[in-house]
Amino acid sequence: MKRSLALLLLLAICIYGQAETISINFKDINGEKSSFEAVVKAPKSEGKKKALVILHHSGGWAAGTTRLYADFFESNGFVTLEPIMFAKRSIPYENAIPEVFASLNYLATRDDVDKNQISVMGLSYGGLLTTIVATQWVNDRFNLEGSKFKKFAPLYPLCWVGERFITRDASRKNRGLKEFFPEEFMDKWVGAPMLILSGAKDSYDDQDPKACQQLIDLMPDDTQKSMSKNIVFENATHAWDQIYSNFYTVSGCKGRGCSNTNLPDSAVTEQGKKELLKFFTSE
């Protein structure tokens, strides 16, 4: 494992150039001391800047997808941090939550970061994780150092999972959240701006273009509902910013299980970046 991580970090140096690989200490869900690696990019300009935590998908950090966003936002004046939550095989969401907040707390200590302007975005697994850490239940238990995320941006985040919790629909699988998270954990949210980017042809959401808007409409928390927005890309599948793949997943078709096809779309990827930049830079 250590050898694999060392190779990944060497790859990061080759790919990122001026990026810095750091180790962040944190306490896991059992209160045990641990650490994880993260890649940080920072503009050379003076003064405090907005910052962004970028959470990778279940293909792992080594797939390099988050680099697309780290490069883009760093070039637009953001300090970016990509936690290496896992190299290839995904971990339970509850195990990743403390790492997300540790990333927030690390950025809040940097001299070049405005601690009140730290946001988070994520892709697929990271997108659902972004949604999860926007709930009040999770913040009450894991975000204990005072810093708060300014904004949240989940990309293709399996919106049916949130809908399943809000409606108490126990008939469908729930993407590994059942044992740890209570049924009511998505009833209350932190009340911060949220932008969900989704594809109308996303097989995880059964190619339902209204799935993510429905998640927002069903939120019992009126404050969060009023601060949330969904942009749907009409011809986009799941993972439009990744390479082509086709596979069966038990989480597909809103938990019924089905084949999922990821079609890369550079135009959608670029449009998504523009929408995200507009969202994160607006007041």
Image: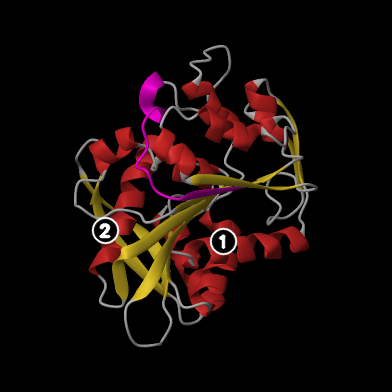
Placement of 183 over or under 106, stated as above or below: above
> Is tag 2's residue or tag 1's residue first in the polypeptide sequence?
2
In the picture of the structure, the residue carrying the numbered disc 1 is 276
Tell me if residue 211 is in the magenta stretch. Answer: no
The stretch in magenta equals: 181-197
Give above or below for 221 relative to 168: below
| Residue at figure coordinates x 35%, y 54% from the top left | 149
Q: Is residue 111 left or right of residue 126?
A: left
Q: Which sits in the foreground, 28 or 231?
A: 231
Residue 264 position, x and y percent, is 76, 55
Quadrant of the image occupied by residue 138? top left
Within 10 Å of disc 1 (Cα), the crowding (few <14, some 14-19, many 20+) is many
User: Of 85 and 146, which appears nearest the observer?
Assistant: 146
Type of the residue with mark 1 = Leu
At horizontal 29% and vertical 60% (from top left) the residue drawn is: 24
Question: Which of the two marks, 2 or 1, is nearer to us in this view?
Answer: 1
Instruction: Label 2: state its secondary structure.
Output: helix
Using the image, tell me which numbered label, if any, was put on residue 194.
none
Q: Which of 104 and 189 is in front in this view?
A: 189
Where is residue 174? Give x, y as percent.
Answer: 53, 24
**Which quarter of the rendered picture does the C terminus lie within?**
bottom left
Secondary-structure class at tag 1:
helix
Q: Is residue 41 left or right of residue 202?
A: left
Determine the image quadrant of residue 207: top right
The residue pinned by badge 2 equals 105
Asked if 208 appears above or below 178 in the picture, the reply is below
> What residue appears at the point 57 percent right and 11 percent down from the top-left corner?
171
31 relative to 213 in the view: left or right: left
Residue 183, magenta (yes or no)? yes
Q: Is residue 237 visible?
A: yes
Residue 71 x, y percent position in the rendering: 55, 73
Q: Whole-percent x and y of residue 39? A: 42, 67
